[in-house]
Image (cartoon, helix red, strand yellow):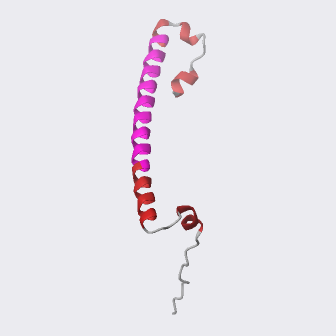
């Protein structure tokens, strides 16, 4: 994408530069589509895991929002030298 930003409209009027710009665009677009597919798969996996979490919470009668708000008691670091 950086190369595309560097070319002026006048630069793009050169056939070879235009070809290079088109190749860069096609590469960037294909990469974008690959990322979007990966993001979609990731989102689906996250939904699946959250459904499992909701199911487990329901079985033990836990409200997930309340659970989120709970502060975990962390043991104080009591190292003695």
Residue 79 image offset from top left, x and y in percent:
51, 89
Residue drawn at x 42%, y 24% as measured from the top left: 27
Position of 38 relative to 57 (above/below): above
Position of 55 relative to 6 (above/below): below
Residue 46 image offset from top left, x and y in percent:
43, 49
Picture quadrant where residue 67 is located: bottom right
Position of 9 relative to 76 (above/below): above
Q: Which residues are magenta?
A: 18-47
Residue drawn at x 58%, y 70% as measured from the top left: 70
In the image, is 73 to the left or to the right of 26?
Answer: right
In the image, is 22 to the left or to the right of 67?
Answer: left
**Residue in the foreground of this view, choosing between 48 and 12:** 48
Residue 28 lies within the magenta run? yes
**Residue in the foreground of this view, choosing between 3 and 60:** 60
Residue drawn at x 40%, y 38% as measured from the top left: 38
Q: What residue occupies the far bottom of the structure in this picture?
A: 81
Position of 81 relative to 40 (above/below): below
């Amino acid at each position: 994408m950086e190369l595309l930003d560097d070319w002026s409209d006048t630069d793009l009027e050169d056939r070879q530069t235009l070809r290079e710009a088109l190749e860069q665009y096609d590469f960037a677009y294909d990469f974008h589509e690959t990322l979007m597919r990966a993001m979609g798969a990731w989102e689906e996996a996250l939904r699946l895991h959250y459904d499992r979490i909701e199911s487990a919470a329901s079985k033990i009668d836990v409200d997930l929002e309340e659970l989120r708000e709970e502060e975990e008691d962390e043991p104080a670091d009591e190292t003695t030298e």
